[in-house]
Amino acid sequence: MNLLERNFPNLKSLAVLPLKFYRRPSKEVARDLLGKFILRFIDGEDPLLARIVETEAYEGANDPASHAYRGVTDRTRPMFEQGGVAYVYFTYGMHHCLNVVTGEKGLGEAVLLRAAEPLGGQEVMYRNRGLSSRMQPRLLLSGPGKLCQALDVGLDLNFHKLNHPPLQIMELKKGAGIEAILATPRIGISKAKELPYRFCLKDSDCLSRRLAPSAT
DNA sequence: CGGAAGATCCACT
DNA sequence: GTGGATCTTCCGA
């Protein structure tokens, strides 16, 4: 029995999300990705599994906060693919961020995966993050840069279709209860700050930032 | 071709 | 809460 099976015995009850799931507006996909599962395969390691707890929607030409706002460039080309592929970018000179492209080809919409809860392969995540395994598991994936570091997501996964290895997003075969979802403003941007395009699982303690106390 | 900003994270006060 | 690390991207001149 490997780490994954020990920590998440229900793996067999997971099914790959069909690409059709992503071919909708980013705001809908961002909300619906909460509670879904990231499954990451790395050669020679146990599979990594995490549950998505925080996302942000970015639109195309109409969203000044979106990388796609200025149109197609070398960096943003993946965003303009048909929904269902990964858009990975490098930022602040040291971090990667993982997005899921949504909508139809040419729109430039995507959803940023901001935080997740580790469910399997934590040993590998601790190692990738350079953290002692005595540290809190919540430190592993609670931010878009941390998530990529822990899951070893880099530019090699740019354009990767998310319905097959080595990186795929899964759902429960038989819909289990989903926790309360909260919409709040996006983080770390200066434009269109007021739009509630960030979605969180309300009761998660693995978010990149605490929710306001008023959000009860 | 220069410069500023950036969908971040960490250490420090 | 603030500032530094670090470097790519994009815009304006």
Image: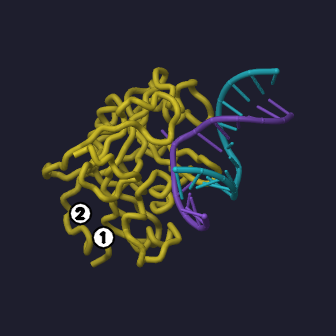
Chain colours: A yellow, B purple, C cyan
Mark linked to residue A4: 1
Give residue A122's quadrant in the image: bottom left
Alpha-carbon span between mark 2 and mark 1 = 8 Å
Q: Which residue is mark 2?
A: A11
In this picture, is A91 found above or below A60?
below
| Residue A135: % across, % down | 42, 74
Residue A208: x percent and y percent?
Answer: 41, 53
Quarter of the picture holding the N terminus of chain A: bottom left
x then y, percent, for residue A6: 25, 75
Secondary element under disc 2, as helix, strand or loop, is helix
Q: Residue at x 40, y 55 (%)?
A: A165
Q: Residue at the location (41% across, 48% down)? A: A114
Horizontal placement of A14 versus A210: left or right? left
- Tag 2–tag 1 contact (CB < 8 Å): yes
Q: Residue at x 56, y 24 (%)?
A: A71
Looking at the rendered structure, the number of numbered marks drawn on it comes to 2
Q: Chain of mark 1?
A: A
Q: Residue A92 at what x, y percent from top left?
A: 62, 48
Q: Nearer the viewer, residue A108 or C3?
A: C3
- What residue is shown at x 17% (from left), y 51% (from top)? A173
Residue B12 lies left or right of residue A139; in this view the side is: right
**Amino acid identity at mark 2:** Leu
Whether residue A99 is visible: yes
Residue A147's tag is: none
